Amino acid sequence: MLNFRALLVFLAITVSLGLAGQLTPGTITISGNSTICSGSTHGVLTSAVPTNTTGNVTYQWTSSSAENGTYSNVSSTGLTFSPSTNITSDIYYKLEATDDNGTVASAAFAVLVHDAPTINISSSPSGNVPPGASVSLSALLTNIPSGYNYTYLWSTGGTSNTETVTPSSTTSYTVTATDQYTCGTAASASVTVTALSGGQIASADLTVCTGDAPGAMTSTSGASGGTGSGYTYQWEKSTTSNSSGFADITGATSATYTFSNVISQTTWVRRKATNAGVDAYSNVLQFTIDALPSAAATASPSTVVSGGSSDLLATGGTS
């Protein structure tokens, strides 16, 4: 009986010493974010020094694609691990420490990878625009991970998800959306600028008699360019010159116009075409007044007897 008790005491001491001698692995930390952009490299992993070790201690870093999966060795055998390759999916690391009592692995440390959302640019108006047209660009993000916030930066310097531009020629614009982990995604869009033409107008007669109106004016060609559609018209007139003093003619908003008001002085007429907020002008028609001639008549002789005759001579005017 005494020998049996001695054996139990020996076993208890052996078990107790074994547990007391098992090392305690250190905690792993990372320099930088543990959530990174797909296709990038994470920071350096560092493990605290294990405690309760016995004898010489060696280390081996391991990794796995699943927290509870199979871990494989990576090329680091110290307390730190510096990755040399970019990663595109979540990865888990453990540090195995081996001393005289065996090998113990640390808790898994996760480096999480998120894919960038999809970004597109929409424009309004879409398609071609005339030079100087105001175009609203909007950055549209889809497949955004939950809890992620984004800031924007346009090639023009704008920092909102929308940007208004007024290009004078065809221009490409880029926007980059960046999340709180400094992961960015970018998109570009081109705004095509097409020159806007006001078209051509004509009139059958540019010389107007005193007391008359210029009459019908035709469109030999309509407005073109710009967005390619949606043109509006406004006829204008001036009595100052062919380049200044123009004012709208009330109600004259068609491609053609009949000038029914009498004019009494030289008058210039043009047609304004508007497209996407941009104006273009036709050629200018100049209507000139042809004043009525003055005429006079003289009689020879100027006095005649009853039943006599006299010659009348007309002067002035044209024949």
Image (tube, rainbow, N blue to C red):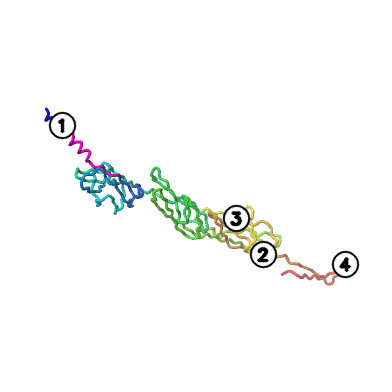
The residue type indicated by label 1 comes to Leu
Majority secondary structure in the magenta region: helix
Say which residue appears at 14% left-offset and 31% top-offset.
6
Q: Quick one: label 4, few (<14), some, or many (20+) residues within 10 Å? A: few
Q: Nearer the viewer, residue 65 or 177?
A: 65
Q: Gap in Å between the C-alphas at discs 1 and 3? A: 111 Å
Q: Are marks 4 and 2 in contact (CB under 8 Å)?
A: no
Say which residue appears at 45% left-offset and 53% top-offset.
153
Q: Which residue is mark 3?
A: 234
Q: Quick one: label 1, few (<14), some, or many (20+) residues within 10 Å? A: few
Say which residue appears at 52% left-offset and 58% top-offset.
132
Q: Which label sits in the foreground, 3 or 2? A: 3
Q: Are marks 2 and 1 in contact (CB under 8 Å)?
A: no
Q: Which residue is mark 2?
A: 288
List the single residue furthest toward the right: 305
Q: Which residues are magenta?
A: 12-26
Q: Gap in Å between the C-alphas at discs 4 and 3? A: 66 Å
Residue 148 percent coordinates (x, y): 40, 45
Q: Which residue is mark 1?
A: 8
Judged left or right of residue 1, residue 80 is: right
Quarter of the image with the N terminus in it:
top left
- Mark drawn on residue 306: 4
First-in-chain label (3 vs 2): 3
Q: Quick one: label 3, few (<14), some, or many (20+) residues within 10 Å? A: many
User: The residue tagged with tag 3: helix, strand or loop?
Assistant: strand
Q: Which label sits in the foreground, 1 or 3? A: 1
Say which residue appears at 43% left-offset and 55% top-offset.
174
List the single residue furthest toward the top: 1
List the single residue furthest toward the front: 2
First-in-chain label (1 vs 3): 1
Q: Nearer the viewer, residue 97 or 225?
A: 97
Seen in the picture, residue 78 relative to 5 is either above or below; the reply is below
